[in-house]
Structures are given as structure tokens and as C-alpha cells.
Image: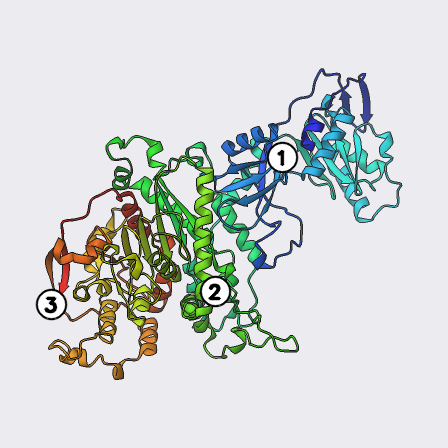
Amino acid sequence: MHIHKMFMQASLRAVPSTLLSINNLRVCFVRENSTKPVKVKWYYNTDQPLSKPEWYEYTQEKDPEKFVPFSDYDNARLERAYEKNEDSVDVREDRLFKVELDKMQLSTVYWQGPVYQVRRGTWFTRDGAPLSDTLAAKIEKGYNDVKAYKFKSEETSYSSRDLTAKFNKQVKEKSSADAVDIAKEEDVVDLGNGQAVIYFDDIYGALFPKKLSALQVNIIRSLQPSYGNLMSVTPIQRGYTKDLDSSIIDSVKSTNVTSLTEIFQSEVASMFTKDTQSTALDDSGDKPDQSKLLEKVLEADYKNDGSELYSKRDVDHLVFCVHGVGQLLGYKYESVNFTHSVNVMRSTMKEVFSNEEKYQQLAYGSKFDSKNESQKANNKIQILPISWRHRVAFHPRKPSEIETENGKSKLPTLTQINVEGVKPLRNIVGDVILDVLLYYEPMYIRQIMDAVSSELNLVYKTYLERNPEFKGKVHLFGHSLGSAICFDLLSQQKEGNNDYKLDFDVENLFCVGSPVGMFEVLKQKNIKPRDEVNDSEISLEANFSSPKCKNLYNIFHPCDPVSYRMEPLVDMKFADVKAEEVPFALKGFNTQVQNLTSLGDDLQEKFYSASNWFKKSPTPTEEDKSPAVKKSGIDDENALGDIISTLTSPGQPKPTSRKTKTEVFDEDTMGSVLKLNKTGRIDYSLPMGVFSIALVSAISAHISYFEDEETVGFVMKEVLGSHEPPVKSRKVIVYS
């Protein structure tokens, strides 16, 4: 039985009425037949994790202080489970977290994350903080021992200012008066550890150091309940009341978490100012205060509704997100982590869905009811993060595991070989592209593939165990390097036992901010649909890649320096076809100006030039002899200069001088692209603002997909439209 229950269920004996006269206050101990039940409220801590995943090398340095209440719905479920002696309860939005009742800890269900203390609040400070379970149990035992539930107080006039001054003076001067004899006080209990509690009535009391004198204790007794100004005295109350949460909830609802985009913009700003305080990470490599940032993240996630409406939804689509943000990012900005980005994506998708009927109609079809609030609250999609980086044996600031004979590291860290110049720029480029560089190293490829495939299968299995009724479709959302990992994993799927085998079929693969196009060109591989290859041909050494999924999407922002197109790798004629434009997620002013922006032309031209390097035709065609193509030969290419100019050139991408025309492609013309995606297109370009600073836009573009309404809206539309048949034809914009 839980320790709380033993105290709460203890029998209460009646005592004769007694009357004490202390200063000008009359405290009456009146006979009552029974105690008043305590109103319980459950809380979780946000400022001091009890533990973190081992790769953080975390040690808790102080006790938890800040606690946030669970929703009323979760509170009732927790209390019922507690009374039934159950082991754990899944809580919060979509039940992505769990409370282990035997340990009183809050942890994540589907990914590894920090573990926080949980408290079953029965006794509270007057500012709303629940007292620790151990302390509350001692206070409750004392409450029953002295039968404080029978106390009634009646105030008369007294001079509170004089008494307060006298009390505080003695505390400051550390009066040598003898400490109060607690055994002689009928309303005081020794709690141990130098602390005592005094009970005023059946609700209120105060904690104080037991070294206080009898006079000081009498002053506390006299001034109750107006004792807020007494030094070293902590007012407490028994049972939860709504006024306790007002300040906590207000502070949580106003919490704003620094986004990935804002952090990188801060790094960019540091390049143009001498104020080192503006940098998110200074040149010495000192980390920012991660505990405060983590606290803000957890509190911001509290904004997610934990009501019954959002706690247990009907889900038809499961989306696994595989991250690909640079290795340094997780070290420098632990709080702005991938799992929080997925939480942001989930919240953004929920908001877009509730505000736009076209998505609701896709989700509910003929059953759609515009007045049904429960339909607006459920897009039938669950998004879960797949974290894998902790399994990869590479850390930019830790020495290599390869040692010399005398036990010292054989290789320097990445930080140790960094040069002094333009550190802010190196920070930015390193944070964005280090993950891509890792994928070139064979030693890390197998580690990464093993880690991601096993995590995907583990999370899928865990989800089915907790949601056995799920019979829906599974989709993959890969960002940056994550998209390349997902693409390669699906390209290795075949019948029978094989390496990296997934336990589920994939409906849609969304490659977002993806370097897959570049990787495939460098490997000189084409992309083929599955019905054009045999399982026996599938291998890492094959001259093609064929992801096993119903639909392949390549989504990019035109300013993203890491993204490349894929369609020309399927069919070269699509090198002359402009990427499809993603419509704005919500109706408004932006939809009116979308046609004014030119999207992705410069990236398309760069890919077109790069793809010509690998044409296998022994003799140049007439097109190859054109001056424009000759000018883009290897001798004139400057890949590094191209990247730097993309990052540093002001304003919008230069508009292409190539003329365009609209054509209609039928099924035969779309060919293999239609087999890879029922929409007849793979490459989708996101809208871009009318004004941008290229450096900021380039970095922001690569990291902001999770919080971007257009990305989220497009992914949601395609997921919910999975049941729709392939197109018969579609309009495309062709460069003439």
C-alpha cells in the first residue's frame, strides 16, 4: 500500500474540548466526528530532471523546485490508478508520457528523454508548490496525531506589525533564548531534520525551524493566518484549491521557447557584431544554461491540451520522424531538441487542421460535420520522433576511442582542429552540414542504419502494444540526413530476411530538406520504382536505388542549401520541368501573392548542370554543344564558391532567364515518376517570402520545416489523401 494511504486511512480518535489563550487569539479545539477528506492534485517537476539519457552525462545537482499541475482529466486518472495500486498511467496529450506510480516519476513512452519527479499534492505552500511526498506524509501523520482536524480559530484584535518586527529581530539576531519545548505544545509536531510544523485549524499551518523560542512560536500562532512576513516561516495548507494554480498556470501559458530558426539567426547576428553576448555559444565553447531552456521546453509543451478530447484519439496514420540536424546542435542546444521539434510539428498540424475545412473533409470524408468539435480536434495522425544520434560513436568535443600505447587518444577532437577565423560562420555551417559529411564515412553508415532501423521497429512495436486497435498506415518523414537514411533503408527492403528489415510497410516517404539527390548523383545511381526491379537485383552495390514505399516525396525550400531535386534521377526529361509549387496551408493574403514569387529556379539549374557530369553518352548531343552547357563544365565549376555565394548573396535567388510554358503530361509521359508517386510529381518546392536575406534564409530554410505551416499542411494533405487514386494527367511548367 502507498505510504500516503496508510496515513490518510488511519483511525482518528476524539479528544475532550480544550481552550488555549495565546496573546489575543483564541484557538478552540472542538470535538468533531470525522476528518474532512483531503483534495489531491498531481504535479510534475520542470526545472530539475532526476536523470537524463546516459549520453548527456548528467548529474542532478539540486532538488526539484518548480512543479506544474497535470490536467484535470489526467489528475482524475492518476488518482484512480493510485487508489487501485496500479503501476503506471499514460498521461498528457496523446498519452506520450507515463507516470510510474511506484517511483513517482514522469518519463517519455516512445523515445528516451529526461525523467522528472511527480508529486501527489496533499499539502501545499501558499504559493502553490506541493510539498514533497516524504514531508507531506510526516505533516499528515502529525495532523492526525494532534487531531488538528478539530481545531477552530477565532481571531481578535492584535498588533501584527509589532509582533512581526519582534519576531524578525530575534531571527536576525539569532536569539539565545531556549528553543521551544515541542512536547509541551499541543498544536506543534517535530518533523525531524531541524524542522517543525504548527497547525492552526483543519486547513492551515506553518513550517518553522524548531530552534525558535517559545515566544516566537506564540507569535506565529498569534499572527495566523496573516503570517506571510515572518522570516524562516513557510505557510502551508492542507488540500488543493484552485487559487493555488493561478500563478503557475499563467507563467506556463506565457512561456515562449526559442526556436531553431531564432537560434541560428542569433549565430548569424554574431557575425556582424562585436557583442559576444549575442552569440548562442561563445568561442570558448561554454554551453548556455540548458536547465532553464529545458524547463521552458517542458512548460511550453504543457500548452498541449491534456483533456479527454486529446488524450485518446482515433488514429489512422502513424508518422515516424527521423532527424538529421547536425551533431553539434544536439550538444550546444540540448533544450531545442528534435523531440521538441516534433512536438511543435504535431501542434502546428493540429492548429492548421482545426482552422481549415479542406483537411477535415479529407480526414472524415462523407462523415464530415463542420459543427462537430471533436472532428476538428482530431486529424487522425500521430507523429512520433525516432532518435538515433546517441547510438553513433562520434562526438565533436570528445576524444576518439582509438588510443595510443600509453592510453592517450590517438586523434584530436573536431573542436581541436578548428581554425580561429570566422568561428560564427563555422558554427553555422558545421551545425547544418556535419551530419551530411558523416554519411560519407563507411564506419558511421552501418552504425546509423542499424540504429535507425532498430529504433523504428522498437517504436512501432511499443505503439502497437499500447494501441492494439491501430490498423492504419505508416509513413516516414526524414529531415536532412534523416531523409537519406530513410531513403536508403527503404531501398534495401526486400522479401525474406535481410539487413535493416522493417516490421511494417511504408505508405509515404517524405524527404524534407534532403541531400538524397546529391548523394545519388555522386554515387551515379538512378532512382527506379519497385515494379521495374527484381528483389535479386537489390543491393548496396546496385547502380540504382528503389525505395519500397507507395509514394516518394521530396519537399524543399528554395533557399535550403542542403536540398536537391530527385525527379531528373528518375527521368532526365524532368530536369527541364519546374518543381511543383506547394500551396499555402491556410487561406489568406499569402495565397494571393504566391504566383508573384519564383520558386527554386536556381537550384533546378544547378542540379541540371551537375547531372550533365554523369551523362554516359560517348558523344555530345546538340544540346551539350550549346554555349550554356559548355560553360558549366568541370573546369568552370566551383562547388565551394557556389555554396558560399548562395549563403552570402543578398536578396532573392536570381530569376532564371529561361522561358517557360505550361504542358499537360499524361500517364505515359509521367512514366516512372507516376509509379513512384501517384500525384505524378516527386519534387515539391515550398513558398518563399517576398523579401529575404539569403544567409539567414538559407540556414533558417534547412532547420525550420518542423515549425513551417506550409510543410506541415502539405504533409497532412498527402497523408490524409492516401486513399485517393493516381492521377491520369497533370499540368506542369516546362523550361523551353
Dot 3 corresponds to which residue? 736
Instruction: Say whether disc 3 or disc 1 marks the residue closer to the N-terminus.
Output: 1
Residue 539 position by quadrant: bottom left
Which amino acid, by three-letter code, is at mark 3?
Ser
**Residues under labels 2 and 1: Cα distance?**
40 Å
Identify the residue shown where x is 69% and y is 30%. Answer: 204
Contact (Cβ within 8 Å) of mark 3 with mark 1: no
So how many labels did they put on this image?
Answer: 3
Residue 609 position by quadrant: bottom left
Regarding residue 419, the answer to whether it shows in the image is yes
Is 158 displayed left or right of 662 in the figure?
right
419 vs 126, nearest the viewer: 419
Disc nearest the viewer among 3 and 1: 3
Q: Where is residue 303 drawn, in percent x and y?
A: 46, 43
Label 3: how many residues lie within 10 Å, few (<14), some (14-19) or many (20+)? few
Using the image, tell me which numbered label, if any, was put on residue 327.
2
Instruction: Tell me: residue 97, above or below residue 476.
Output: above
Circle 1 SS class: strand
Instruction: Tell me: residue 265, above or below residue 355.
Output: below
Q: Where is residue 324 drawn, in percent x and y?
A: 41, 60
Residue 597 position by quadrant: bottom left
